[in-house]
Amino acid sequence: MATKKLFIRTFGCQMNVHDSEQLEELLKVAGYARAESAKDADLVIVNTCSIRDKAEQKVYSQLGRYRHLKKSKPHLQIGVCGCVAQQHGERLLEKAPFLDLVIGTHNLDRLPECIARARQTGRPVVETAFRETVPSIGIPTLPAEGSVSAFVTIMQGCDNYCAFCVVPYLRGREESRGFEDILAEVNALAARGVKEVTLLGQNVNAYGKSFGGKHSFAQLLRAIGAVPGIGRIRFTTSHPKDLSDDIIACFREMKNLCESIHLPVQSGSDEILARMNRRYTSADYLDRVRRLREASPEIAITSDIIVGFPGETEQDYQKTLDLMEKVRFDTVFSFRYSERQGTAAVGLGGKVDPGEKRRRLIELQALQDRHTQEKHDSLVGRTVEVLVDGTSRNTDRDVTGRTRSNKIVNFAGGRDLIGRTVRVRIVAAFLHSLRGEMLEGEGGFPGCSSR
């Protein structure tokens, strides 16, 4: 029998990317191999994100293109997985009646059986019920041979119910994955040559709470830090209210915990933070930043900010700019507030004019660009450790990698450097990357634990 071909189109964050890796692993066992494009596939999966309206609209636009493809390939199966599937369920079939599969966030592990059922019955299969546990978070995924880094899911869901966020409604309540299961996966990755792992969850700081706090996130970090061969550890995403002293201490004590943290602040106004149900103040946030920098002076701090949340006045917005000036983030992912049905913010008054939201976002992004460029400029002339993870997009004469603080560096070198950590002197700084020169005599070394 000829091998069936699979194409997965992923929208959204790192967690969605890893979900797609897990789906591919499931379907590999079911006899599917990766297709280079949708037109070569027997099965197309669209793995979706709906945290913002723009992301959801991209999904519908993509589905429209696949609809035309199915007309020329009647045997082609098309499925939607993830948050858009969870949010709309059977209603998706009204917008896209050509779909064969609608699989929600708690049912990704059922995809192979759903594919077979749809093929046998000739009718669409919709699975969006929440379950007590989410088996798919434990699907181990071994990366391709030669991969330098890998994602590891440690938990799913969120219990915070921020007023703007759909995650608790689409991913469910917090569920932590077993401590020993995570360590077993990290050990398997290390045995395969992976040097860097990124731990994933909607709120990694809350790891362990769903099974009574037997193991905390800090304990998990320290256990992973002891796995031979793992030279770099990263994690995302952190909620400021759950950033404990013990987690902060890990940055001081662990040599292989990278000096980098994503810590979404969302707003610099206490009034807006309260309306968002964030459960911290701007002073609380600044105190956590201070303690992080005391523990790890070189730490890079990135964040998320929303402008134009209901009730945000010009004064509130200026407080956000003031906080940015105090913190000097390395990078900020910033967005205009996007109303999501089902969230508490839908019922709030004080909607901000779209044009005003656009103005605020442009101004805020310009400020952050200045801060980012200043951070990058300060690295010129310094020597940094770069874990080489591939060749440059621009020329195969260059390789690319990341510093411990998660900065992209391009420099001249051959493919034999991939998987190695080398010392590189920064010679030029740009907004989104750095240019470097590898120090003479550097052949690279397998470990990457020095600070």
Image: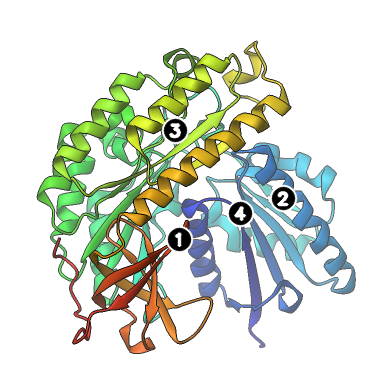
Are the residues flagged by discs 4 and 2 in contact, CB closer than 8 Å? yes
Element marked by disc 2:
helix
Are the residues flagged by discs 4 and 3 in contact, CB closer than 8 Å? no
Percent x, y for residue 4? Answer: 66, 79
Q: Nearer the viewer, mark 1 or mark 4?
A: 1
Q: Which residue is drawn at the image coordinates 15% and 65% (left, top)? A: 449
Q: Which residue is mark 4?
A: 11
Q: Where does the N terminus fall, quadrant-wise?
A: bottom right
- Residue 338 in sight in this render: no
Residue type at the position of mark 2: Lys
Q: Which residue is mark 2?
A: 58
Residue 430: numbered disc? 1
Element marked by disc 3:
loop
Percent x, y for residue 185? Answer: 29, 63
Q: CA distance from mark 4 to mark 2?
A: 8 Å
Residue 173: numbered disc? 3
